[in-house]
Image (cartoon, grey):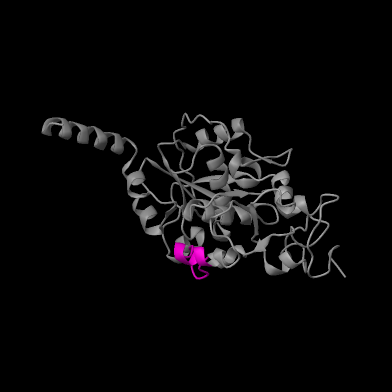
């Protein structure tokens, strides 16, 4: 290759890279820091999306330029218990100005529980490498007293076209039963609290129970989701710490993993860690305990001896 050809090729690569946005080039991992995001608030190729659970929290103050998603209406089908269908998701993505050449930063309250759920749904519909989580979410942004806004900023709609859903990222009841019956080598990782896992309680305090029985899926192992988070600021622990944490219960990436919790939100947080941060093969079971624990005829494990929620 001549020097002139080399220069021309380099210029073409640079031009194509610039078309993707400088921010997208600068941040290739699955997480972005609060420092990075504040520096890139005005980048037209960065789209910030809040996915929180507390009502009204977005309206009281959000990261400047952030769009808002209500997980229980925007990311699900409200009549059937299902994630948003292709048409609904495509309409949402377009409304948010999201596309494959835009860096999408998701964040939320509860240390990014539902922001991770959003990342999971985005990934199912073909938005993966350009979708990031804000490390620490709202908690870290607010702790550092970074700027907030109260007025939504309109964005230009995109022309995003949804592709075939990647169903490998979603575990169904049949996948879980196959693991229980040892017809599959997938490991089930339950990320609920120890009391939920043992069957001492069915749901955390203040939450609807939604299941008749207490306990866990036979053969599953337990690593509460919060153990993966630095409690001071909500950021994730280092990859080395995370690998060690999950390896303690035999989750090391050598076998597929199914993450499970109560309704699939906390487990999506662990799914994000396993899949996006550690690169393990993982699927989120959004049916989780509210499905498995209510199915007639399926075995459960209940070390606390409270099968029906009370002795």
What stretch of residues is rendered in magenta?
229-244
Residue 57, by quadrant, is bottom right
Looking at the image, residue 198 lies above or below residue 66: below
Quadrant, the C terminus: bottom right
Residue occupying the far left of the picture: 3
Q: How many marks?
A: 0
Residue 224, by quadrant, is bottom right
Looking at the image, residue 30 lies above or below residue 130: below
**Overall secondary structure of the magenta section:** loop
Looking at the image, residue 24 lies above or below residue 273: above
Quadrant, the N terminus: top left
Q: Residue at x 50, y 63 (%)?
A: 243
Please provide percent x and percent y for residue 49. 50, 46
Front-lying residue, 217 or 80: 217
Query: Is residue 186 at least partly visible in the picture?
Result: yes
Q: Is residue 103 magenta?
A: no
Please provide percent x and percent y for residue 149. 46, 52
Q: Residue at x 51, y 67 (%)?
A: 244
Q: Residue at x 49, y 39 (%)?
A: 127
């Amino acid at each position: 290759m001549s020097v002139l050809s080399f220069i021309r090729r380099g210029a073409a690569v640079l031009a194509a890279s610039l078309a993707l946005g400088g921010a997208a080039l600068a941040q290739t991992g699955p997480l972005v820091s609060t420092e990075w995001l504040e520096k890139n608030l005005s980048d037209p190729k960065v789209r910030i999306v809040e996915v929180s659970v507390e009502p009204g929290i977005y309206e009281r103050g959000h990261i400047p330029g952030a769009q808002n998603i209500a997980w229980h209406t925007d990311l699900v089908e409200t009549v059937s218990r299902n994630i948003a269908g292709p048409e609904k998701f495509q309409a949402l993505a377009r409304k948010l100005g999201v596309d494959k050449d835009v860096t999408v930063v998701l964040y939320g309250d509860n240390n990014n529980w539902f922001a991770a759920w959003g990342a999971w749904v985005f990934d199912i519909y073909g938005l993966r490498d350009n979708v990031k989580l804000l490390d620490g979410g709202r908690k870290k942004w607010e702790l550092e007293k970074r700027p907030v806004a109260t007025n939504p900023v309109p964005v230009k709609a995109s022309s995003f076209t949804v592709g075939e859903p990647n169903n490998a990222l979603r575990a169904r009841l049949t996948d879980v039963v196959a693991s229980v019956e040892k017809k599959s080598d997938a490991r089930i990782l339950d990320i609920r609290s120890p009391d939920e896992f043992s069957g001492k309680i069915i749901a955390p305090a203040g939450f609807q129970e939604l299941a008749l029985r207490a306990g866990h899926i036979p053969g599953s192992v337990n690593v509460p989701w919060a153990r993966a988070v630095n409690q001071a600021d909500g950021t994730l622990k280092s990859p080395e710490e995370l690998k060690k944490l999950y390896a303690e219960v035999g989750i090391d990436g050598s076998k597929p993993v199914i993450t499970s919790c109560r309704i699939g939100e906390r487990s999506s947080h662990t799914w994000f860690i396993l899949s996006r941060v550690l690169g393990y093969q993982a699927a989120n079971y959004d049916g989780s305990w509210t499905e498995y624990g209510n199915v007639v005829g399926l075995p459960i494990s209940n070390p606390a001896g409270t099968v029906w929620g009370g002795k």
